Amino acid sequence: MKNEPGGRLERLFDLARRAKDEPSPREEGFESRVLARVREERERKRAWSSWAWRLAPLLLALVVFLGLWNYVSYPVSPPDLYAAISGGGEEEQFVHLWTGE
Amino acid sequence: MGASHEGRPDEGLIRMVLSGDDEAFGELVRRHKRMVFGIAGRYARNASEIEDICQEIFLKAYRDLGGYRREAPFAHWLGRIAVRTCYDALRKRRREERDVSFESLSFPPSSSDPEKDLSPEEAREILASAMERLAPDERLVVTMLELEERTVREIAELTGWSEGNVKVRAHRARKALKRILEGDDEK
């Protein structure tokens, strides 16, 4: 049995189960460190949301400015593309008809 | 932590945390840290890794506390988070150290009867070294089944895998461990 890997495994498990779980020295003051991280995370979130709120008017102004700039730069709407294409075709057909080409 | 928190049940503390009382969360951590350190200690390699995993577990618990439904005791809910966080840590470690050579793992000097004079701590160390070579899911299952002596159903609840899946993984893990202990793994 001793040399069988299965038996060996069982013996190892059996022994290992008897090993005591010693408290880790890191448990000392652990809750304070966790709370510090919780607060740090909350502060980071708060900083992000306050920046987002501060940036909101700026973004709004940018959108308005771009809209106005677009309106001022292109006051007349461009000609209708379909009309331009079909208009050109009619003219071509008219030339074909009269020239006989 | 404040004395006013000490006698309160977990549910009362959770309500206080949700209404913004951090100290109540500190009390929850103080109460359950032993259990969480016990779980993380089976998968981490050193004290600093245990600390990192445990902090991650409690931070996740803090973030998800609003989702705790009180259907099971808080310790069960926290245990589930702990097991999943340990599994994630194992997978992350596996990705980082894809080529851990078997020779680099430390085993106590072998003799003709290797387990004859082993202490429980040494046996645990040998198993931990051998389990470093298992896939994360196999290691998780075999640890919970053989060292923590949990039932298949409990493991299924903690991991979210089906019972059949847990059995298959346990079978695979034991087979792989036997092979590792035989020393045939490198063939």
Image (cartoon, rainbow, N blue to C red):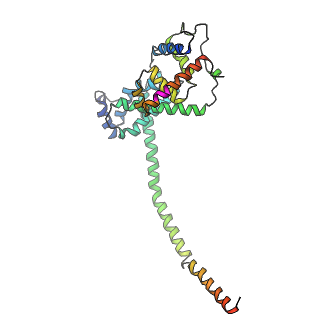
Camera-nearest residue between A39 and B137: B137
Q: Residue at x 58, y 77 (%)?
A: A81
User: Is any atom of residue B27 visible in this view?
Assistant: no
On whether residue B109 falls in the magenta region, the answer is: no
Q: Across the whole image, how many numbered discs are drawn on residues?
A: 0
x, y percent for residue B180: 59, 20
Q: Residue at x 70, y 91 (%)?
A: A99
Q: Quadrant of residue B58?
A: top left
Camera-nearest residue between B21 and B132: B132
On whether residue B168 falls in the magenta region, the answer is: yes
Answer left or right for B24 relative to B99.
left
x, y percent for residue B35: 40, 25
Compared to B19, does B76 lie above or below?
Answer: above
x, y percent for residue B19: 32, 41
Q: Quadrant of residue B8?
A: top left
x, y percent for residue B73: 33, 30
User: Is any atom of residue B145 visible in this view?
Assistant: yes
Answer left or right for B60 relative to B5.
right
Main secondary-structure element of the magenta-colored stretch: helix
Answer left or right for B8 relative to B118.
left
Residue at the bottom extreme, as displayed: A98
Compared to A30, does A52 lie above or below?
Answer: below
Residues in magenta, as a range: B166-170
Q: Residue at x 61, y 21 (%)?
A: B105
Q: Residue at x 56, y 15 (%)?
A: A5
Q: Quadrant of the C terminus of chain A?
A: bottom right
